[in-house]
Image (cartoon, grey):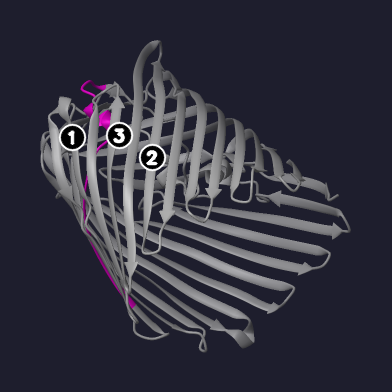
Amino acid sequence: MGNAIQISRKSQSAYIYKGNNRGNNVTDEQNVLTQTGAKRRIGPSIPSFLSQPSFSAPLKKERLLFNNVHSFSGNRIYKLNEATQLRFNINYLHDLIQQERGSITHYYQAGDTVTLKEQNDTHIRTDRAEVAASLENNADSRYLTNDFNLSGNWERSTSRISGVSSVNQHIRTPDMGIRNYLQNIWPRDKYTLELRSLLRYHNQPAHILIDGDEQTLHLQQFYLDHSFAFLRKKGNLTRQYTTGITGDINSIRNGTSLYFKPNYQWNLHKWNLTFHLPFVWTTFPAAGFSRLAANPFLYINYKFNYAWRFSFHANYKESYGSITDLYPAAYRTDYRNYRMNNGILPVYRNQSYSLYGEYKSTVREFFSTLSLNHNRGWSDRIFEQQVRDGQVSLVSHRLSNYSSGWTVKGTLSKGFYDWGLKTSLSYLLGRNNAEQLSAGERLPYRYDFMQYEPKLIWSPLCSFSASYQATIYLGRSKIGTGTRLDPLLNVVQKFQLSYELFPVEINLSADHYHNDVSRDKSVNAFFAGLFLRWKMGSWQFTAEATNLFNKKQYSYTQYSVTESYTSWINIRPREFMASMRYKF
């Protein structure tokens, strides 16, 4: 890691290099830096046909990430005048990831259960570059910002899969994009006007090659979103009216939408009420799709006194699928899975309700929350899962289906100041119901779960602290009328000791993972780590040891919709690292 900073009266520069092969995910760090607070500037998620293989397990990500990453970013800011500044940013990322894993997957269908086994060795290479320029003018009469972004993302992977037979898989998902976002705000004495404009173009020619059989899926999209807003605040009432248009010009089916969004907010002494009522008309003419939707949202907050607060929210929302759903032909998503959307753009309607209450007492160091949530969903599309000869197909059908769910969650927290002790307990209970087609029959499924998280922090001295945290999760599934999967218990326990008395800092951590693999089998994994830092003037020395017990493989079982899968995955072995820094 290295960085350089330059500061002058009219300009500032910062250059940062990071590289590692120890499982630290620099990719996520760059995503946070470029996307935090920028949802309106970026627009909706970019549609795609294919995605690269992913690795997941109920472990810290750095324990299973075998990577070799190099990241560079440069930032320069020019102060043009007292109200205007110009910012330039450049980012480059090169990342190589490899992983070996195996799995046994059970597909539960109407009257049958299919089991598939596999083992794969995967290598993923990512090269990502981004150039951005931002102009900001914060004058008394207006606020203007314009963000321009040019990006290129080249991802490719190679997988060697072995099971009943051996398969070689290659996936390439390049993405070239350009984006410009303009925002102009004019504040006046009694009202505020806002103009927004987003223009975005992406070209994504995805390729998948399975043992010499190649499929190419071209996707190009030009997306725009222009809007104008009027805001006025009078007394306790704030009103905002926004009207706009979006356009989606792409290589599958073109679409557009018009929207009008009135928002109201009342701020009273103890009450806060918010009401939104967006109207959105969406059409894809070539697909024969045209709908007008109203999506009301209500939020009520009541603060009884300093200790008690209550809130209620109700929401109804209608949304639609991605433009890739309008693709008429079947296509592979990997060596085993096919997807056939049949050109059906689904309509999703969801209503959700929540009731929340909290109590806090600073004197007693006691804090409590309770939240009740319920949701109901409806869609006019349902997927049928077909498993034949080791191949899994998801076929879209125009049929109504429903889903529902509820959760109860809360926290209890109590502190003991004289003892230097803080305790807390978080809990979550819930149930989800939905359905899927199997062999032409509707196959309902249900998932029940509960989770508890006790936590203790003890700091008897300024230089010493100890903490303990556990996550206890129990889940079970019911599929159809006759299949009940065994409950799975997963427990994670984390213990940490910290000692800091200048110039020395020492941290010792220990983690325990317990996972049920089946009714009669469970696995346990123990991890321990040690961290030491010593400061002396401008020098800083650090030493770190991870996975002291040298655990190299991890197994777990999870349920997903009408499937269950048991997997093993390689994890990083015992590692040692020492570093030295000097601050000029």
Left or right? Give the position of 541 relative to 496.
Answer: right
Name the residue located 39 percent from the left edge and 38 percent from the top edge: 198
The amino acid type found where label 3 is placed reads Thr
Left or right? Give the position of 18 relative to 244.
Answer: right
Residue position for label 3: 115
Q: Which residues are magenta?
A: 310-330
Look at the image and tell me in which quarter the N terminus lies: top right
Query: Residue 420: x and y, percent?
Result: 63, 81
Total tally of numbered discs in the picture: 3
Is residue 122 in sight in this rendering?
no
Residue position for label 2: 197
Q: Residues within 10 Å of mark 1 (few under 14, many from 20)?
A: some
The amino acid type found where label 2 is placed reads Ser
Mark 3 vs 1, N-terminal side: 3
Query: Marks 3 and 1, how far apart in space?
Result: 42 Å
Mark 2 vs 1, N-terminal side: 2
